[in-house]
Image (tube, rainbow, N blue to C red):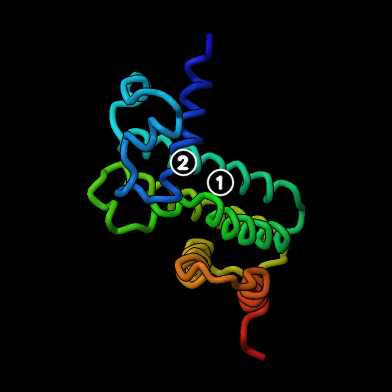
Amino acid sequence: MINKEEFRRKILISAGQIFSRYGFKKTTMDELAKALKMGKSSIYYYFDSKEDIFEAVVLHEANILRNELTTAIKSVESPIDKMRNYVFVRMKSFEKLSNYYNAIFDINLNHFDFIENIREKYDREELAILRLILYHGARKKVFNVANSEYTALAIQTTLKGLEVPLFWKKKEVNIENRLNAILNVLFYGIVK
């Protein structure tokens, strides 16, 4: 007999791929059932609706991102390396975790309360992580940060501004060069 949690996970992974390919709006329960090689009623045993499945997929991807970011930050000691790892993993993960990314940025999904809750939680968590990195760097006298709240907000705003050109155009851009340029400005400024 298959473990219920294991089966839910199988549904999430398969549904994640379908939502990623067709988007939330165009994905149907019939397509999900076909991809899983099971009846719709079997899916309804685990989830109440397509919205419930999408919410679970988005939360699953959010956990993946959170774990990857935590690992990237903890893997290095230097505050500069922590910030560099955070920025690189964050931007590259968004490419892989397209359902989470779409949930956060697709205005067509605004009518779902869970989307707004996910967006707010993501913003709060990101600001907390950035403040922690900045605090760590200021304590080690590596960063000169007058106000970690505003500095974290400025970094978050910069990263969000990068998302549009990097991921919405779906062109092959050299993300490494762009991220390094941003980090260079972030760490060293533009004033002589």
Classify mark 2: helix, strand or loop: helix
Q: Under tag 1, what secondary structure?
A: helix
Q: Considering depth in this image, is 114 or 167 the residue closer to the camera?
A: 167
Relative placement, left or right, of 40 versus 8 is left
Residue contact between numbered discs 2 and 1, judged by CB atoms under 8 Å: no
Q: Tell me if residue 63 comes above or below residue 86 in the rendering.
A: above
Q: What residue type is labelled 2?
A: Gly
Q: Estimate how packed mark 1 is, as few (under 14), some (14 to 19) or many (20 or more) residues with alpha carbons within 10 Å.
A: many
Picture coordinates of residue 12 (x, y %)?
Answer: 46, 33
Q: Where is residue 122 in the image (x, y as percent from the top left)?
A: 44, 49
Q: Residue at (53%, 21%) from the top-left corner?
A: 6
Does 147 appear above or below 46? below
Which residue is denoted by mark 1 in the rendering?
Answer: 65
Tell me where residue 188 appears, x and y as whole percent.
Answer: 67, 78
**Residue linked to disc 2:** 16
In the rendered image, is residue 19 in sight?
A: yes
Q: Which of marks 2 and 1 is in front?
A: 2
**Residue drawn at x 49%, y 20% as measured from the top left:** 5
Using the image as rendered, state which of residue 91 and residue 53 is in the foreground. 53
Report whether residue 150 is seen: no
On the rendered image, what quadrant is the C terminus found in?
Answer: bottom right
Q: Residue furthest left?
A: 111
Q: Callout 1, which amino acid?
A: Leu
Estimate the x, y position of residue 54 in percent, counting from the top left: 37, 39
Of marks 2 and 1, which one's residue comes earlier in the chain?
2
For residue 160, above or below residue 20: below
- Which residue shows up at 51% across the image and 28% down it? 10
Q: Decide: few, some or many residues near mark 2? Use Cα within 10 Å; few <14, some 14-19, many ≥20.
A: many
Residue under the image location 56 percent in, 46 percent down:
65
